[in-house]
Amino acid sequence: MARSTLIRKLAEFAAEGGASSPETYALYFLNWISAAMSGAHENAADILAEFMAQEGTGNYLPLGRNETLRPSDCAAIDCFSSAIQAYDDIHFETTTHPCGPVAAAICAVIRKQETTLKELLDALCIGMETECRCARALFSHGSSGWYTTGIAGVIGAAAAVARLLKFNAKQMENAMALAASTASGNRGTHGSMAGSYIPAFAAKNGYDAAMMSASGFTCSSSALDGTNGLIACIDPDADIEKALQSLGTEFISLKTSCKPYPYSFISYGLISCFREKREYRDIEEVICTVSKRCAQLGANPFPKTMYEGFVSLPYITAKAILDPESLCIPLSEHLTLSEAERELISKIRIEEDQNMNDQSASVMIRTKNRIDTLSSFQPSGTAEYPMTKEDILHKVRSLNTVDEVLIKQLEEPETYYNYVVRITDRLSLEKKI
């Protein structure tokens, strides 16, 4: 199937297609809101918000903050906050984080115009689906060093905003093409504040692309799928047919998983090895076997920052052995390893198995008295074993970002959507007077 088919088909779907599973997308939105509110008070969010406030003020409040900024800057801060603690969501097939850029761009629109809950959830579904479909096309042969969320997320964000603005298919195509012209991001940013900023500028640029399109700014559709477009530059042999397969009837974004742990997805298989509580004394050696990609991304044994801690498999393994209850608590921005963690990490070795997938792992723990062999089993937070509604509510409660009165409203299905509406009302998604 020709590349030029992609943007036309996606634009028609984003403008005219029906959405799916509003309750599931409402849960994605709730999870994202909670992650954004939790991360809004991190030092990195202070730095970015203060910079944006100095460059130009506006009339709108970012989630959990007091600066008054322009809507597009709010989109950037909100998405950045949601990504800071690595506690948002992931689409394992494409390794994009679909909700962040899309939800943040949607919230920027909500600040400016009245939006019904149905319109919000439809736009979230359409934007996330567009992002995942684009990611499938762009990285059907692997993502190499590209940061998928920065590349595909901007297109999903633009589609969501354009959906709220009621674009027709031709206008939608223009917005998506303009967004594609700003796509960027590489995984060399991992382990630093910039790793969380890539989804943020995807949200901002996607919002801007749709708004500029609404004002008459044009872009050739070739920016996405032309001879010199984004797809051709990243993967000339992109599988367009797979990207469009069952579009509008099957929603691949429903395979998005909310994160049960504030770490990279590369740790989930490893963490699941410790599903049974055991006490270990006199540990002499720990060998963790993971996929090649997990081993390459997670080999740093002694993280010096929170960002390095997200992807340090030796550090995460040490926490799983020493204090498994802490695995669901966001890391401190000023990460300091305890003496016990340092001692144990020095005994941990990460090995790779090219036949393993990213959600599999095995662990051998040798003590003075025995050898234990552990293996991953139904890792929580993966596409096959996603967090349940109850799991997500427990996560929201533990992050203390939404009050208990609102959470209790979610116990009855008929109050579910009113609950999400009230959350948006509580989070200053209105113009500051």
Image (cartoon, rainbow, N blue to C red):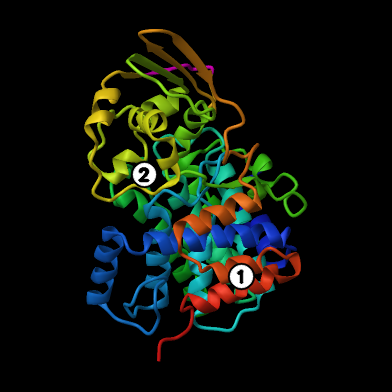
The C terminus is located in which quarter?
bottom left
Q: Is residue 136 left or right of residue 101?
A: right
Q: Secondary structure at mark 2?
A: loop
Most extreme residue toward the bottom, as rendered?
433
Sequence-first tag of 1 and 2? 2
Q: Which numbered circle lies on residue 186?
A: 2
Residue 229 shows up from this direction = no
- Label 1: few (<14), some or many (≥20) within 10 Å? many
Q: Residue at x 65, y 36 (%)?
A: 384
Look at the picture and state if 51 lies above or below 257: below
Q: Residue at x 47, y 28 (%)?
A: 270
Question: In the rendered structure, which segment of residues is drawn in magenta?
Answer: 350-355
Q: Position of residue 280 (x, y in %)?
A: 40, 20
Query: Quarter-wise, where is residue 39 in the image?
Result: bottom left
Residue 213 shows up from this direction = yes
Task: Name the kind of residue labelled 2 in the image.
Answer: Asn
Q: Residue at x 47, y 64 (%)?
A: 206
Q: Which residue is mark 1?
A: 420
Q: Is residue 184 left or right of residue 134?
A: left
Quick one: 225 or 319, which is closer to the camera? 319
Distance (Cα) linking label 1 and label 2? 34 Å
Query: Quarter-wise, where is residue 383 in the image?
Result: top right
Query: Quarter-wise, where is residue 267 in the image?
Result: top left
Q: Position of residue 314 (x, y in %)?
A: 34, 27
Q: Is residue 241 left or right of residue 432?
A: right
